[in-house]
Amino acid sequence: MEGQVVEGYLLGIDVGTSAVKVVLFNLQGKVIAATSKTVPIYSEKPDYAEQNMNAIWDIATHSIAACLAESHVDPALIVSIGVTGQGTGCWLLDESLQPVGNAIIWIDGRAKSIIDEWKKDGRHLLAFEKSSNSIFTGSPVAILRWLKEEKPEILKRAKHFVFAKDWVRYKLTGVLATDASDFSMFPLPLEGKVHSILNIFDLEELEEILPPMREAWEVVGTITREAAFLTGLRAGTPVITGVVDVAACALALGILRPGQAYSILGTTCFNAFLTERSPKLFEPPGVGISVFYPLKETFLRAMATMSGTLSLDWFLTHVLGKEREFCEQKEKLFVSLEEEIRQISPGAEGLIFLPYISPGGERAPFVDPRARGVFLGLSYTHRDVHLARAVYEGISFSVLDCFQSLAAPFEEMRLSGGGAKSDFWCQMIADMTGVKVVVPKVRELGALGVALLAGVGVGIFADPSQAVEATFRIDRIFYPDSSLHQFYQEKFLVYRKLREELGAIWEMNDRIQERMLFLLEVEKSRESSGSEN
């Protein structure tokens, strides 16, 4: 360590899709205290997914205060703070720097007709050729274009565009900024000039609302007196720019060398490897994303699904009816469920599940906003536990599908996210991929990764590499079973064939449903007019 600080703490704040997590670390990366509070998602219509920005800030302030109270640490000993969070989506502020309605988050699907149009006219591929990022329904440019066409009054009020982490950091410091990792998925062209992308999508007038870009570990502000009052933090504590959650997780996982692979088994399954600027950034063409990484001239080339553990959460709450237990004793529920699943043979006795349950369809390793979840192979003999095993396997197949599409060979995968808590699931991932799976000691990797960057920002660490090398520790390692790997390779062929054949059927089903919704809206309008008369 370089600086003069010999005692102190780093605070990491992770503004996730499902929860805000606040974690206090010592300078060796050990967790001192942690809090997590759920963030609700609002769906006014079937394809919508929104979050209340002011509610997120309230949750963040209470979570920070709770974390400090649990730690019994003097806030004056917190030497630096970092904020990370969910990527993409659309978070807008007005001229008074107040939210323009709810944030439209990355799983939203309202822009699917726009994606259809861009795929047909070639703009989808043109944007990929500039940025190495495919456009999906949750992409900022797709949502902004939808707003321009459907809700122009909202865009008229919007004077600032931010990302999730930027919103919370602004509330902490009063400073608006973003970094290249979040902005890369806007998408930002590799040469760094966003106006060419805006021109492609007829959004050039919006360049003026985009925030300035700063280095990930740069101290951009300090805790304001108001934020200090609400959180218990010390006014004047340095706060860095931060990075998007998937990049923060990669740092905490020790991803430092090109070719290293990792997967975040979370709300989304983010499957990536580190690479330098090369043709690999554009393989396969038109699909996947590339994220600027806070190591010089490196990128995370990734396939990020729309639904990871989201599918399992949905199954537990809405199929098994475990909503109350899910909220009150989530980890015990998973342990109990997995004990039952272990009694079912691999392959779930012929069942296969496609985990495409997001309102926005799927974005990796293929882009189809109309993709939907499917159970194949149901019979009278199947019980709920068979379906549960199929869900676990379906999510794992989606991870394998992504890595096979990337065609980047590796011998070790580092695994994180909520799913990595499960030995059962980690072993399944190892068996399916056929590689060693390494799980780190610290679970809250997003918070740790951005906390390490906060340490770099104030000179505790010389650079991100030194910060990672000083703190990374392995918890568990899983080795693949060769016979199960062979079985899952054969089963995967069925999974892959099924999702490839369903595209036309998904579109047909969606068109029929859209017509029905239109008719219902017309009928509702008639009834409303009749009652007024």
Image: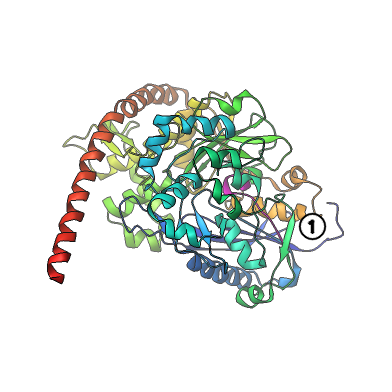
Q: Specify whether 188 is left or right of 382.
A: right
User: In the image, residue 464 lies at what x, y percent?
Assistant: 74, 45
Residue that mark 1 sits on: 458
Q: Does the magenta stretch include residue 31?
A: no
Residue 246 visible in the picture = yes
Quarter of the image where one finds residue 473: top right
Image: 517 above or below 370: below
Residue at horizontal 64%, vertical 76%? 226
Residue at horizontal 57%, vertical 24%? 408
Residue at horizontal 38%, vertical 36%? 117
Quarter of the image where one finds residue 274: top right
Residue 434 visible in the picture = no
Q: What element carries label 1?
A: loop
> Where are the magenta residues, as a range?
239-249
User: In the image, residue 161 lies at what x, y percent?
Assistant: 56, 56
Residues 465 and 297: in front is: 297
Residues 392 and 288: in front is: 288
Image: 226 above or below 403: below
Picture quarter with the C terminus: bottom left
**Mark 1 closeness class: few <14, some 14–19, many ≥20 residues within 10 Å:** many
User: In the image, residue 493 lies at what x, y percent?
Assistant: 36, 22
Q: What residue type is labelled 1?
A: Val
Residues 396 and 49: in front is: 49
User: In the image, residue 163 lies at what x, y percent?
Assistant: 56, 54
Residue at horizontal 37%, vertical 60%? 42
- Name, please, the residue furthest toward the bottom: 229
Quarter of the image where one finds residue 279: top right
